[in-house]
Amino acid sequence: MNSNAIKARKKVLVILTQSPYGNALSREAIDYCLAAAAFEQDLTLLFTGDAVLQLINDQNPSTINQKDLTKTLSALPIYGINQFYVDSNALEQYGIDNDFCVPTIKVDVKEISELLVNADTILNF
Amino acid sequence: MKTLHIVNKSPEKPSIMERCLNFSSKGDSLLLIEDAAYFALPSTISKITSRLDALQIKIYALEEDLVARGINKKIHGSIQIVNYEGFVELTTTHNKSSSWY
């Protein structure tokens, strides 16, 4: 174990890969982020794969009896979480690239692997 | 800063392994567990060995999952077999781990 392991404030990279309403993982990721933010952890969120679909504005999941995920996502900056990275390849795959519920930074494959390298801890949802 | 990448989905879902390899760095390690154990078969691992070699990624597969699936004697020679204890040890010899699923 190196000294990073005992550092109180960790750089946590949260990798999101799932669509918003296909399963509970997207909501669980937000629950984790809120809890970790309460413990003043340094959080970075990366949306890749289907998770880029979480960012789309104008979702109205009341039609399927679910809560609007974008409402919670857009509240994260209030809790000091404001590093939102999004995989540019995934955006291209779905043909979406603007009108998101939070301000995002687009990153390519190389920049994403650097995010992994620079993190103390990685959590995948 | 080395990362242990843990994959658990079969080659039938190639986007999972693809994402793992895309975001890996030189000297990282890859551990195949659950249905990803099927990647250890020579015909499936050969599809990704050039990329693994380019990144100098060491490949491990979980013995319990290989045995359960009857493929522990059929795997490619470049893959190192670890049991649950070895799995734990890998998590301690890497700075962090990332589970792709």
Image: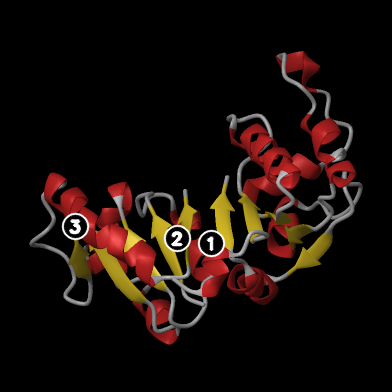
Does residue B87 appear to the left or right of A71 in the view shown?
left
Instruction: Assess whether mark 3 and mark 1 are in contact (beta carbons under 8 angstroms).
Output: no
Q: Disc number at residue B19?
A: 1
Residue that mark 2 sits on: B17
Q: Residue at x 69, y 63 (%)?
A: A89
CA gap, disc 2 and disc 1: 5 Å
Same chain for marks 1 and 3? Answer: yes
Lower position in the chain sequence, tag 1 or tag 3: 1
| Position in image of residue A24 (x %, y %) | 59, 30
Q: What amino acid is found at the position of numbered circle 1 in the picture? A: Arg
Position of residue A54 measured from the top left corner of the image (x, y, whole percent) = 74, 40
Residue at image coords 39%, 84%: B56
Whether residues under marks 2 and 1 lie with C-beta atoms below 8 angstroms apart, the answer is yes
* Secondary-structure class at tag 2: helix
Q: Where A81 sits versus B20, above or below? A: above
Is residue B44 visible to the viewer in this orientation of the structure? no
